[in-house]
Image (spheres, helix red, strand yellow):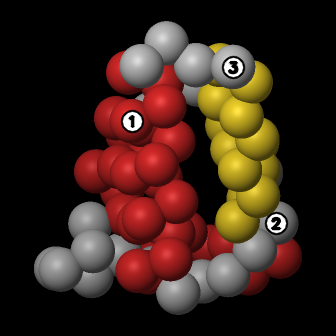
């Protein structure tokens, strides 16, 4: 299955959960593309101790677009 995820927020919990979904889909063999739009392009600053956004982004092996 092909999956496209569009993230357009800087909310750390939402980015974290979207990237978790993307990582699970890739592990199941799906082709996944993640698009960061608007405030989401600042995802590197969005992480918190509870929601480690960068760990999820670094784990992602699909297509990633800013």
Q: Which residue is mark 1?
A: 24
Give the quadrant of residue 10.
Answer: bottom right
- Image point (18%, 80%), residue name: 50
Looking at the rendered image, the disc whose residue lies closer to the viewer, 2 or 1, is 1
Q: Which residue is mark 3?
A: 1
- Please tell me the numbered disc located at residue 37: 2
**Which tag, 1 or 3, sits closer to the chain's start?**
3
Q: Nearer the viewer, residue 6 or 36?
A: 6
Q: Residue 61 location, x and y as percent?
A: 48, 23
**Which tag, 2 or 3, sits closer to the chain's start?**
3
Circles 1 and 3 in contact, beta carbons < 8 Å: no
Mark 1 is surrounded, within 10 Å at the Cα level, by few (under 14), some (14 to 19) or many (20 or more) other residues, namely: few
- Cα separation, mark 1 vs mark 3, equals 13 Å
- Image point (69%, 19%), residue name: 1
Residue found farthest to the right: 38
In this rendering, does residue 28 appear at all? yes
Q: Nearer the viewer, residue 55 or 2?
A: 2
Circles 2 and 1 in contact, beta carbons < 8 Å: no
**Which tag, 2 or 1, sits closer to the chain's start?**
1
- Please tell me the numbered disc located at residue 42: none
Secondary element under disc 3, as helix, strand or loop, is loop
Q: Residue 2 location, x and y as percent?
A: 74, 24
Mark 3 is surrounded, within 10 Å at the Cα level, by few (under 14), some (14 to 19) or many (20 or more) other residues, namely: few
Mark 2 is surrounded, within 10 Å at the Cα level, by few (under 14), some (14 to 19) or many (20 or more) other residues, namely: some
Circles 2 and 3 in contact, beta carbons < 8 Å: no
In this rendering, does residue 61 appear at all? no
Q: Nearer the viewer, residue 17 or 58?
A: 17
């Amino acid at each position: 299955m092909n999956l496209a995820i569009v993230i357009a927020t800087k909310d750390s919990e939402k980015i974290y959960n979207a990237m978790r979904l993307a990582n699970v889909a890739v592990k199941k063999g799906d082709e996944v593309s993640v698009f960061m739009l608007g405030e989401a392009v600042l995802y590197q600053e969005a992480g918190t101790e509870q929601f480690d956004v960068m760990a999820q982004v670094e784990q992602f092996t699909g297509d990633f677009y800013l």
